[in-house]
């Protein structure tokens, strides 16, 4: 069957029809969510597009159902509420990407694999695709048969011949429970990684064993040469031995290269699997719980490389080396009798030195790790603030501070290097003693006829190998201690409070924008004073609220709580009557647009910075966002349009332009709730007036919260909250609050 020859398990083909809503509006949704006119008119999107795929209403001559019908049945099976609009998300992406997006939207774990030869219970329900592009859902296994739904119920046999009409891929969707997830970097996780890479590790182990066995060739060759060939001048025997030795050494060289490749592949696989998961867990951490220093956070994440190196390379090879230490001593015993006691004692002493050295650096590795983290943080701070350092002529100050950091870390690094050097010198000294000891003991053995000179040479070479293996244990111990410290630092970060958990898996399908704060208090640290204290208010959907107050009064903190960047220490925040603590915050953010006080742009294109995580952007909403924010003016003048490059931090844009991009980013998905923190603080008066007029003319149905110190932007609000020292001290209609604030305070009676 040709269908089973497809090497790619994921579907690349597209279903033919567009969504009903796209048909009705005359637009086709592209992969990034933007729409394009069906007539292919002059308006072209800058957004990337792929092959358009329709997902609804298959043709009458197609055998199966639509993929959305299959998803709806799976949602019903698990009690998940989905709407027609939510099933349209990503409807123009490839089928593979569409299914991933929908699985994420419904809180299900997705797995796309080649269609198995036989289907088991744990795989179900399973979405499969007919050759004509339509879909079916395999629902249950009943004995040796399967129940299949393709718009009607069918029974098929659970065997390969029955699957010939399907393409060679299948999609399984399962509920996600936190308790089912293997904790990252736990013992179970490590065992799982070993299990996944065991075929590769087994080859590494086999190659390492053979390499160590080939190590015996040169010592044995030397023994035979001095004992048999040289005394008898046996030229032919020498040729045979040398030829054999060269062949073995060639194989040894090849095996070492193969082992290196296998080890690197194992390391790469761990890196590809673990590092994205690590970053995902860090980004899933509650924003208010993350370390204040970005440099410290980056250093802790980068230190994962130590764990990866120990886990994928050093531990496997080191364990085998340690086993062969005893094997080589056994070979020496067979070859030279009691002479093996000399390398045995020396190897034991080298191991003792490695352990003692390990205890020494263990006492200093924590301090050294902290100093390295501080250096990384300080450098990050300097490079991000080069402009401020230059304009304030503070270069000498920061060079002086850097010299102080170097002095502190240098002392610790010096102690480490001295200890490492002493360990190497002690190992070398013991190696020399080993050679002297071998010569002394061998003299008496040879004198008594119990040993030959060839045996002595072979023993000396093998004992050198024993010393080298023992010395490598020092590096392994050092790597373990540093990896252990890195592991502890990472665990502290990974154990911080996460945004998503089992109690927050309710995914709202729409947000009206109604907000209620019920006795909300918040502090950044348990010992710090309240940033907000006993705050209560309620707003209706579509209401526009201005938040004003002195600097540090808690205005921005209030928006952070609404954006889900922090959880209230006390009290409740309600969105449309739902307790925000019980909602999936990622889903909530699909309906919330946020303009932070200090917007950050990322290296890439303007398009990337605008779309970011948007899933529902359309060509219409994109154009509207460009117009409202005012960036359409400078985008239209750039030859690359939305593909114009953006440097790290948006350094090639002015502060006003960066702020305008942040406004457009917040509006790109036309969210029903907008949180604007000083949205015009860097804009000139003309740009600010244009933004105000656009908001007043196009956002009558949006719920808006605006934090500002500029009175002009208050024109867009109809209600004002006055915040002072973490409390709401005034709340009322805009004109009434402004009148009260502008009226002079009554004179005190004498």
Image (spheres, grey):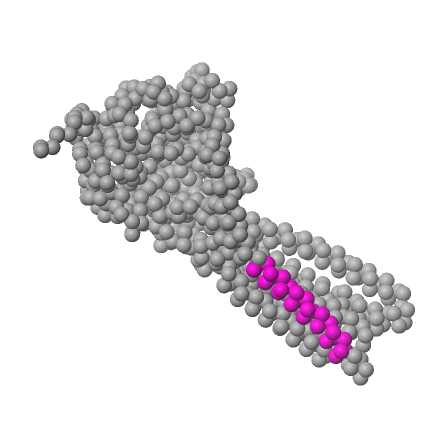
Which residue is most to the left?
Answer: 749
Residue 582 is left or right of residue 206, and the answer is left
Q: Which quadrant would residue 432 be assigned to in this image? A: bottom right
Residue 301 is left or right of residue 697, and the answer is right
Q: Is residue 304 visible?
A: no
Q: Is residue 704 visible?
A: yes
Q: Residue at x 60, y 69 (%)?
A: 353
Q: Nearer the viewer, residue 173 or 603?
A: 603
Q: Nearer the viewer, residue 481 or 66?
A: 481
Horizontal and vertical percent position of residue 492: 41, 54
Q: Nearer the viewer, residue 98 or 712?
A: 712
Residue 339 is left or right of residue 606, and the answer is right
Horizontal and vertical percent position of residue 391: 47, 32
| Vertical arrangement, residue 356 with respect to residue 12, above or below | below
Residue 439 magenta: yes
Q: Residue at x 82, y 64 (%)?
A: 241
Horizontal and vertical percent position of residue 513: 25, 33
Q: From the image, which quarter does the C terminus lie in?
A: top left
Horizontal and vertical percent position of residue 86: 33, 34
Residue 489 is left or right of residue 506, and the answer is right
Q: Residue at x 46, y 41 (%)?
A: 381
User: How many marks can you see?
Assistant: 0
Q: Which contiguous range is marked in magenta?
A: 415-442
């Amino acid at each position: 069957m040709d269908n089973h020859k497809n090497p790619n398990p994921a579907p690349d083909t597209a279903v033919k029809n567009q969504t009903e809503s796209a048909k009705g509006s005359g637009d086709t949704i592209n992969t990034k969510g933007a729409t394009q006119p069906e007539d292919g008119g002059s308006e072209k999107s800058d957004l990337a597009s792929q092959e358009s795929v329709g997902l609804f209403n298959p043709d009458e001559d197609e055998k199966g159902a639509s993929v959305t019908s299959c998803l709806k049945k799976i949602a019903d099976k698990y009690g998940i509420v989905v709407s027609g609009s939510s099933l349209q998300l990503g409807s123009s992406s490839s089928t593979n990407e569409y299914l991933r997006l929908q699985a994420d939207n419904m809180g299900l774990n997705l797995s796309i694999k080649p269609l198995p030869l036989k289907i088991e219970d744990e795989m179900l329900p399973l979405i499969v695709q007919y050759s004509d592009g339509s879909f079916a859902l395999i629902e249950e296994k009943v004995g040796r048969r399967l129940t299949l739904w393709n718009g009607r119920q069918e029974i098929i046999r659970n065997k390969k011949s029955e699957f010939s009409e399907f393409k060679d891929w299948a999609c399984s969707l399962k509920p996600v429970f936190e308790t089912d997830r293997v904790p990252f970097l736990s013992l179970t996780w490590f065992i799982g990684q070993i299990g996944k890479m065991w075929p590769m590790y087994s080859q590494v182990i086999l190659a390492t064993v053979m390499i160590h066995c080939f190590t015996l060739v040169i010592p044995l060759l030397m023994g035979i040469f001095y004992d048999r060939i040289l005394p008898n001048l046996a030229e032919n025997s020498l040729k045979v031995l040398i030829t054999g030795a060269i062949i073995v050494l060639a194989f040894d060289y090849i095996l070492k290269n193969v082992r290196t490749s296998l080890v690197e592949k194992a390391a790469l696989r761990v890196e590809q699997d673990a590092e994205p998961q690590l970053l995902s867990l860090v980004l899933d951490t509650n924003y208010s719980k993350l370390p204040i220093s970005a440099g410290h956070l980056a250093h802790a994440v980068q230190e994962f490389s130590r764990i990866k190196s120990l886990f994928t390379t050093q531990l496997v090879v080191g364990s085998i080396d340690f086993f062969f230490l005893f094997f080589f001593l056994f070979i020496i015993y067979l070859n030279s009798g009691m002479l093996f006691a000399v390398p045995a004692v020396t190897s034991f002493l080298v191991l003792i030195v490695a352990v003692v050295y390990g205890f020494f650096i263990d006492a200093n590795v924590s301090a050294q790790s902290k100093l390295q983290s501080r250096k990384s943080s300080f450098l990050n701070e300097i490079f991000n603030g080069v402009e401020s350092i230059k304009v304030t002529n503070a270069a000498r100050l920061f060079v002086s501070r850097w010299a102080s950091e170097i002095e502190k870390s240098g002392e610790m690094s010096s102690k480490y290097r001295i200890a490492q050097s002493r360990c190497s010198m002690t190992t070398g000294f013991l190696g020399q003693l080993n050679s002297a000891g071998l010569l002394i003991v061998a003299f008496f053995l040879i004198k008594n006829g119990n040993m030959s000179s060839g045996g002595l040479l072979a023993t000396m070479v093998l004992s050198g190998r024993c010393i080298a293996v023992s010395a490598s244990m020092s590096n392994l111990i050092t790597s373990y201690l540093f990896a252990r410290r890195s592991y502890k630092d990472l665990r502290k970060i990974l154990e911080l409070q996460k945004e998503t958990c089992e109690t927050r898996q309710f995914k709202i399908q729409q947000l009206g924008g109604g907000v209620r704060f019920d006795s909300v208090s918040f502090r950044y640290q348990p010992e710090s004073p309240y940033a907000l204290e006993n705050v209560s208010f309620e707003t209706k959907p579509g209401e526009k609220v201005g938040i004003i107050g002195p600097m540090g009064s808690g205005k921005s903190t209030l928006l952070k709580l609404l954006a889900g960047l922090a959880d209230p220490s006390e009290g409740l925040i309600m969105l449309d009557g739902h307790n925000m603590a019980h909602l999936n915050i990622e889903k909530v953010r699909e309906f919330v647009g946020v303009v932070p006080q200090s917007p950050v742009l990322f290296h890439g294109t303007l398009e990337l910075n605008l779309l970011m995580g948007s899933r529902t952007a359309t060509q219409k909403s994109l154009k509207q966002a460009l117009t409202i924010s005012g960036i359409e003016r400078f985008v239209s003048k750039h030859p690359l349009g939305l593909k114009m490059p953006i440097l790290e931090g948006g350094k090639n844009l002015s502060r006003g332009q960066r702020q305008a991009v942040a406004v457009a980013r917040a509006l790109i998905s036309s969210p029903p709730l907008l949180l604007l923190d000083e949205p015009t603080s860097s804009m000139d008066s003309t740009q600010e007036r244009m933004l105000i007029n656009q908001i007043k003319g196009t956002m009558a149905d949006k719920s808006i919260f605006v934090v500002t110190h500029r009175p002009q932007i208050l024109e867009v609000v109809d209600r004002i909250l006055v915040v002072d020292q973490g409390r709401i001290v005034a709340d009322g209609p805009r004109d009434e609050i402004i009148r009260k604030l502008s009226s002079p305070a009554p004179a005190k009676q004498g």
